[in-house]
Image: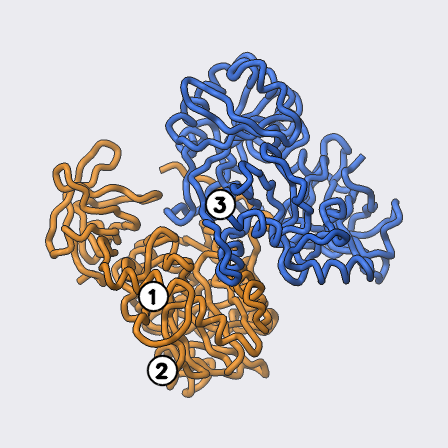
Chain colours: A orange, B blue
Amino acid sequence: MKKFYIAKSRRLRGTPYSKRIENQGLTAYTVYNHMLLPAGFDGLEKEYFHLKEHVQVWDVAGERQVQIVGKDSTKLVQLMTCRNLSKSKVGRCYYAPIIDEQGKMINDPIILKLDENKWWLSLADSDVGLYAKGIASGLNLKVDVTEPDVNILAVQGPKSFKLMEKILGKKITELKFYGFSYFDFKGSKFFIARSGWSKQGGYEIYVENREAGLKLYDELFLVGKEFNVKPGCPNLIERIESGLLSCGNDFDNGDNPYECGFDKYIDVESDINYLGKKALIQVSKEGIKRKLMGVKIDLDKIEIMEEKPLQNGKSLVGYLRSAVYSPHFKKVVGIAMINKEYWNKKTSFELEINGKKSKGLVCDLPLV
Amino acid sequence: MKKFYIAKSRRLRGTPYSKRIENQGLTAYTVYNHMLLPAGFDGLEKEYFHLKEHVQVWDVAGERQVQIVGKDSTKLVQLMTCRNLSKSKVGRCYYAPIIDEQGKMINDPIILKLDENKWWLSLADSDVGLYAKGIASGLNLKVDVTEPDVNILAVQGPKSFKLMEKILGKKITELKFYGFSYFDFKGSKFFIARSGWSKQGGYEIYVENREAGLKLYDELFLVGKEFNVKPGCPNLIERIESGLLSCGNDFDNGDNPYECGFDKYIDVESDINYLGKKALIQVSKEGIKRKLMGVKIDLDKIEIMEEKPLQNGKSLVGYLRSAVYSPHFKKVVGIAMINKEYWNKKTSFELEINGKKSKGLVCDLPLV
């Protein structure tokens, strides 16, 4: 496939780490929340094997925060998500679908409860801040909605625990999954969560002070040498194998959270109030007619830039939305929106790309 | 400056024209409203001279439409903009600032009134659809907010009038600036406006049928041969020389529309109702302390990826936000947010880039 350069400008914002990571072997960018997001170094498969064995530092500043503060902040956050946050605790992260009044997906952030009246939504790629501002204005809520200058560094991979312990001390290893706390490094306070967009373990450091963040960045690479640290980025192979969904790739504003398999993050029973509740109650009564599932395809490479129909004879099985060659499964694996008639495992299908047909099978997520 | 590839995925949506334009010499992309926007071919200056003399076809499908339909659509559109739309007419385009409740810029779309209860906002790069949905939900407005599959082709340059006349007939030359109408091509209806993001004249074709659009695309290049047609894209030199502002580059959510020079699109006098009106009334009373102006700098090249301070001795003159070498002025020209003390013409300043200082002058917009 032909390659194209990215035309940089102020509109595609650089991060505090851009200059460093560009000198560490970066080859490609994508754009995420109007910001440059590193997207490639020395090859997807090399990076995949390294991530699964060692430790990587990711510049994921593009995961911008919507900060919602004020008397009505909890009300506003709940209005945007179908996940019941009524028992949420300060110091915890909540993965949650953000939906519109039609019950359709807008984003799937991690929601962080920093205080009773202070929340961060750590975003996938859409301007949820504008949605929040619109609702707040419409309902005249007492909130401040802002995008603070928070620039996340993710430390991911099995050796991330030892690397972070060596820099920040034993206490960091005691963080529970999706818990967060403040840690000190050379006199600066860092907000760190045990989270990240891989299933290889690790942390996300919510850097609030650019200068201090760069010092920590350098320390991660210095101390990380003994752990074979490398710069990295979310890895397409790892995330599809792990069944981590990508907003904009696997689902979009045409899909509802049931179709995305987010059932456990949907509350249509209790009396919480959110936009789209009526729509989701309706969906829960009627049931869905399609949902995201895994697929395995007999191919040794693929590049998906738009959804592709999967056929079984003349019948439409569904649409392939993300796919990549998996060295583990030794075939192409992917995520597809599959029609109800084909949910039973092992449904076979044909995928046609550039006139060439390949065979594949529907399977569960995460892939096994 | 180091170059990086763009990592494509479904999330960075392709356009109906992507395949064609990639085979016509495209070298670079940017991302605009989660969509690929062509950003370079055979060199910025070559493209600049060609645009000013001949005609170009631009794939600007990234200028997505927010469609607002329904009983309360006019109310909702007015709520988002400080421009008075109470006398707006069906069949006309209105350039308008979209602002938040704090009176800060969110977008600067062209608003098209298609019918008494049907509007399109032809967007710069931010998810105004989410803002509209939020307000509509908060106020329980009777509207449908959607992103229709409209993919704009711009035909720009002095020869665009002859090219379009040859394909669509005499009637197209009678369109007034910022007027629009429907035109027939081979049995398909095309919505065409006399507009575009250059000052070289031309049209924007709001393609609603992909297949018909591709036929028209091909016809533009076939018939365009005699007018030396080329594929193109918004040109940094031309747009800065012409004083066309770029949302995200020249202004962002930290700026108010007075600071952007949008005074004639702000109504704080009449009784129209919009979010941010209170804030703008306050600004209009107090006056602004900085505004966007032109600058000329004694340099023969520049690349701006973040705003750069302009100094006069130890005093801050303002911040440079966009800049490029202009073959016309034979120096670098740019757009900068200038502090009030320095609004008088011919204020000189120093700009430091990579340790090297250059001299420059503040001037009016558009540059003359």
Residue type at numbered disc 1: Ser
| Residue A367: mark | none
Nearest-to-viewer mark from 3 and 2: 3
Q: How far is the residue under mark 2 from the one under mark 1?
A: 16 Å
Query: Considering only order in the chain, which callout, 1 or 2, is on the residue closer to the N terminus?
Result: 2
- Please tell me if label 1 and label 3 are on a single chain: no
Q: Nearer the viewer, residue B59 or B167?
A: B167
Give the label on residue A176, or none. 2
Residue position marked by numbered label 1 in the rendering: A198
- Is the residue B167 above or below the residue A359 in the image? above
* Image coordinates for residue B19, horizontal then vertical, percent: 39, 32
Q: CA distance from mark 1 to mark 3?
A: 41 Å
Classify mark 1: helix, strand or loop.
Answer: loop
Question: Could you say whether the residue bearing mark 3 is in a helix, strand or loop?
Answer: strand
| Residue A343 x %, y % | 15, 55
Identified by mark 3, the residue type is Val
Out of B177 and A284, give the one closest to the viewer.
Answer: A284
- Which mark, residue B69? 3
The answer to whether A97 is drawn above or below residue A26 in the figure is below
